[in-house]
Amino acid sequence: MRNDADTAVQRRRGARELLVMALYQWQLAEHSEDELCEQFAAMPEYPNVDQDYFLEILAHVLRDADTLDREIARHADRNIDSTDAVSRAVLLLGLAELHGREDVPTKVIINESVELAKLYGPVDCYRFVNAVLDRAAKRVDSRNA
């Protein structure tokens, strides 16, 4: 039997997986926030994820995508235009969490992002994701110190 903390972790992890898919689709098909919410709410796994988290982070990324992209460019060792859609989706998610979720430890955000990159991204993109988020986290943490 699972305890509530394990269930919460799994629900949050599920929300992150759906967010990567939604952000990937948003990049390719340019669906609106409402369209994405409607589509992903209809998915069979949606009732099992942290829906509030999904909605909050999706709104944050779509609202602040330009700012988040500039931050990726600031910390990346390559041109943002050459970043594949999965890596960008994972980075947008991770940066939104770094900036908007003080309740989530930085280590958790980076570790979850790296795992998502390993799961869904091209070979070795997890290294790029780790490097960008590590640099961004140092900057965010120094502002909060």
Image: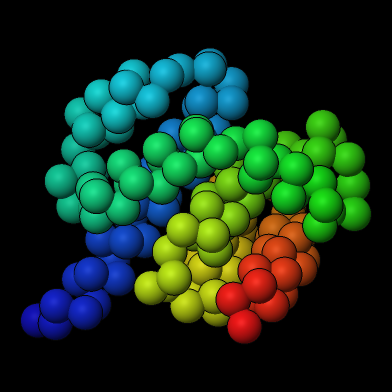
| Residue 7 falls left or right of residue 27 | left
Q: Name the one closer to the observer, 78 or 126.
A: 78
Q: Quadrant of the C terminus?
A: bottom right
Dividing the picture into quadrants, the one containing residue 143 is: bottom right
Give the residue displayed 45% in from the left and 43% down from the top: 60
The image position of residue 133, as x and y in percent, is 68, 64
Dividing the picture into quadrants, the one containing residue 132 is: bottom right
The image position of residue 61, as x and y in percent, is 51, 40
The image position of residue 31, as x and y in percent, is 45, 17
Q: How many marks?
A: 0
Examine the rendering and report whether any part of residue 124 can be seen.
Answer: no
Dividing the picture into quadrants, the one containing residue 32 is: top left
Give the residue displayed 14% in from the left and 78% down from the top: 4
Give the residue displayed 72% in from the left and 70% down from the top: 139
| Residue 35 falls left or right of residue 42 | right
Q: Name the one closer to the observer, 95 or 18.
A: 95
Q: Name the one closer to the observer, 8 or 123.
A: 8
Q: Quadrant of the N terminus?
A: bottom left
Give the residue displayed 50% in from the left and 27% down from the top: 25
Q: How is the image coloured?
A: rainbow
The image position of residue 68, as x and y in percent, is 65, 45
Q: Name the one closer to the observer, 60 or 144.
A: 144
Depicted 77 relative to depicted 111: above or below: above
Identity of the residue furthest to the left in this view? 1
Examine the rendering and report whether any part of residue 103 can be seen.
Answer: yes
Depicted 90 relative to depicted 130: above or below: above
Depicted 29 relative to depicted 132: above or below: above
